Amino acid sequence: MRFGAARTLDLRTSMPTAEQAVQRLDPWMRQKQVEKAGDVLVITGRGNGSPGGVAVVRVAVRKALTQLKRKRVVAEVQEHTPGSYVVTLERTAALFEAGKRTRDTEPAPRVAMAEVSGLDLHTVRMLRALAARALDALGAPRSERFMADEFRRQFSVLSAAIPADAPDREARLREIVAAALEAYDDAE
């Protein structure tokens, strides 16, 4: 009752594979972070129905939550029951404060210029405003090079929060950019 359906991700009922569970977890957590959901509940199940009683989904989700913590999406993870976790999400602005770790083997997603050039002018203006705020927060100059790099970085970070098959991805992106801009306003 404490979380409700909007703040609960049930990975037990659909019985996904470990990979499917992680694929659902990442964008859902990023979405809830942008929505400022606070604490959320992730139900993995105990693994009792798994072959050999090994909770592969639970282990994969725990590992993914640890990675999301490094990426500043997750602030804290606590075991709620043997089949669920309570996850406290970071504030949205923390996404932009996360530095690149040298141990990260996965390269940062490259933004195709065709993807950016297909954006509505209003979305581009919002992303430019967000890039400017981020540079100001870092104390970096607003040169065109820095602005372009920060624009692409913001776009890649925020678009990762939207599932690839989501309807009207650009409208969703604008909502996330607006939330990020609001997070910078809240920090001031």
Image (cartoon, rainbow, N blue to C red):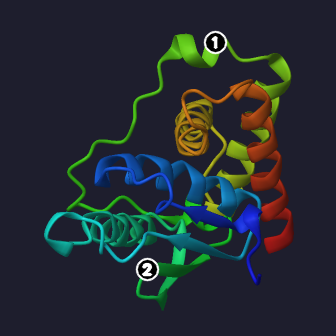
Q: Which of the 4 image quadrants contains residue 9?
A: bottom right
Residue at horizontal 26 percent and vertical 46 percent from the top: 106
Residue at horizontal 44 percent and vertical 72 percent from the top: 69
The three-letter code of the residue at mark 1 reads Ser
Q: Name the residue beneath numbered marker 1.
A: 117
Would you say 47 lies left or right of 179 here? left
The three-letter code of the residue at mark 2 reads Gly
Count of labels in the image: 2
Marks 1 and 2 sit apart, C-alpha to C-alpha, by 44 Å
Residue at horizontal 32 percent and vertical 63 percent from the top: 57
Is disc 1 surrounded by few (<14), some (14 to 19) or many (20+) residues within 10 Å? few
Q: Name the residue beneath numbered marker 2.
A: 83
Residue 79 showing in the rendered view: no
Q: Nearer the viewer, residue 67 or 188?
A: 67
Would you say 3 lies left or right of 71 here? right
Q: Position of residue 62 (x, y in %)?
A: 35, 72
Q: Nearer the viewer, residue 65 or 19?
A: 19
Checking the image for residue 72, the label placed there is none
Residue at horizontal 75 percent and vertical 36 percent from the top: 172
Q: Secondary structure at mark 1?
A: helix
Q: Position of residue 134 (x, y in %)?
A: 67, 54
